[in-house]
Image: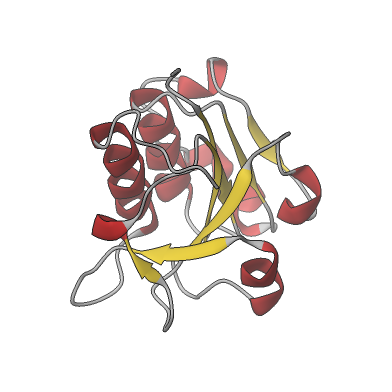
Amino acid sequence: MSKGYACVGLFNPKTPENVGSVMRAAGCYGVNSVFYTGTRYDLAKKFCTDTKNTILDIPLIGVEDLKNIIPHDCVPVAVDLVEGAKPLPDYKHPKRAFYIFGPEDGTLKKDITNFCRETIYVPTNGCMNLAAAVNVILYDRMAKGESFSNH
């Protein structure tokens, strides 16, 4: 079995520091592309902290709607600290996943979680920083190896 395929979607990210750190995580964990919505990042991207210049190897693409760009055969997975979400330690990642994260200062809208097949969360005592959450989800995917579920 191959390593799978993973993309990240960011719903209206707030800070360029977090987007830069997400790009760095994407490079570390072999993400294929990163998409984002909203205008806040566009206004602040000149301050990006992608210290490894990952943007040269992994596309960072602004889009209107994450639902309309789900990569072929990818399972959309919402990552949010909400009631009813599955805890990450018990989660089996899909072989082809599109992880969608909410903004640093909010949560995902219901119209996003509704089209996602599952919603997962990292068990913590509070909400995590966006880049930290991306790192934890992608590390968990890598650590669990090829034991992807058969959605």
Please name the colour scheme applied to the rendered image. secondary structure
Q: Quadrant of residue 27?
A: top left
Q: Residue at x 43, y 79 (%)?
A: 82
* Rendering coords of residue 87 (x, y %): 31, 66
Q: Residue at x 51, y 74 (%)?
A: 107
Q: 8 left or right of 90?
A: right
Compare residues 121 and 90 and report the one nearer the observer.
90
Q: Is residue 35 above or below residue 107?
A: above
* Rendering coords of residue 15 (x, y %): 47, 55
Residue 20, can we see it?
yes
Q: Residue at x 38, y 31 (%)?
A: 24
* Rendering coords of residue 33 (x, y %): 59, 30
Number of numbered tags placed on the structure image:
0
| Direction bottom: furthest residue | 83
* Rendering coords of residue 91 (x, y %): 34, 55
Q: Is residue 83 above or below residue 111?
A: below
| Direction front: furthest residue | 150
Q: 69 left or right of 144?
A: right
Q: 106 left or right of 130?
A: right
Q: 40 left or right of 138?
A: right
Q: Quadrant of residue 133?
A: bottom left
Quarter in which the N terminus is drawn: top left
Residue 103, can we see it?
no
Compare residues 4 and 56 and report the one nearer the observer.
4
Compare residues 13 and 33 and report the one nearer the observer.
33
Q: Is residue 99 above or below residue 110?
A: above
Compare residues 16 and 107 and report the one nearer the observer.
107
Q: Is residue 79 above or below residue 69?
A: below
